[in-house]
Amino acid sequence: MKYDNTLPITERHKHGDQSSLVDRLWIEGKYLPQLSGEVLYVGVNYYTDFYHELVKDPSLFTTVDMDVKVAKYGSPYNHYVDNIEDFLEYADQYNHISVFGLFGCGHSVIKDRKVILGILNKCYDHVKDGGTIHFGTSTDILSVEDSMDMVRSSNLKDAKILSSFTCKPSQIHSEVFMFWGAKNAT
């Protein structure tokens, strides 16, 4: 099924519960459609398999996830099976990097604050000047204040804020913190 971005956002979702959540609606309807150039999206699953179709040039959309079982949901153009820390050791710079949903969830593999800060700093360093970084966490483990403190404690503090908010995607989900900032924006 091809993603049809001419339909109203509520009719475009093909993955039921996950992609009808407020945070996913923002990513799919506001964030991804604005991105041009090389995009790195970290972490994939069944509800992200069409995300490459939402950016201006799908062939420049790269995904990375350490779980080989979800590789089929990554970008059909560029997908890597690797953890983000190791991937960034050999990765190029990107116009945009998204690290959403990797931290703060009960199922998150990475829970150590120092490790998360290190990843955020490395991601920021891999964003080209004028590019953007998107960081989002669930509050299962990290509070909103913890998440905001990570932005203030990392290189993200130097980014021009394009959007920053919290939302509660549904009654069964914990609150979500979102940050989107531009690196060396003029």
Image (cartoon, rainbow, N blue to C red):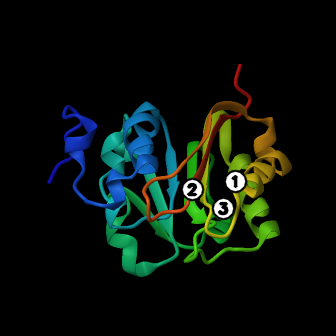
Q: Nearer the viewer, residue 178 or 118?
A: 178
Q: CA distance from mark 1 to mark 3?
A: 26 Å
Name the side, left or right, on which 87 lies relative to 68: right
Q: CA distance from mark 2 to mark 1?
A: 8 Å
Q: Nearer the viewer, residue 12 or 92?
A: 12
Crowding around mark 1 (Cα neighbors within 10 Å: few <14, some 14 to 19, many 20+) is: many
Q: CA distance from mark 2 to mark 3?
A: 29 Å
- The residue that disc 2 covers is 175
Tell me the kind of residue under disc 3.
Answer: Leu
Q: Secondary structure at mark 2?
A: loop
Quadrant that contains the N terminus: bottom left
Q: Residue 88 — which label?
A: 3
Q: Name the front one of labels 2 and 3.
A: 2
Percent position (x, y) of residue 177?
61, 50
The residue sitting at 78% across, 60% down in the picture is 117
Name the side, left or right, on which 155 lies relative to 179: right
Q: Is residue 36 above or below residue 14?
A: above
- The residue that disc 1 covers is 144
Quadrant that contains the C terminus: top right
Percent position (x, y) of residue 28?
38, 43
Q: Nearer the viewer, residue 53 or 11?
A: 11
The residue sitting at 68% across, 49% down in the picture is 126
Among numbered discs 2 and 3, the one appearing first in the sequence: 3
Q: Secondary structure at mark 1?
A: helix
Q: Is residue 30 above or below residue 73?
A: above
Among numbered discs 1 and 3, the one appearing first in the sequence: 3
Tell me the kind of residue under disc 2.
Answer: Glu
Crowding around mark 2 (Cα neighbors within 10 Å: few <14, some 14 to 19, many 20+) is: some
Q: Are marks 2 and 1 in contact (CB under 8 Å)?
A: yes
Tell me the kind of residue under disc 1.
Answer: Val
The residue sitting at 39% across, 52% down in the picture is 21
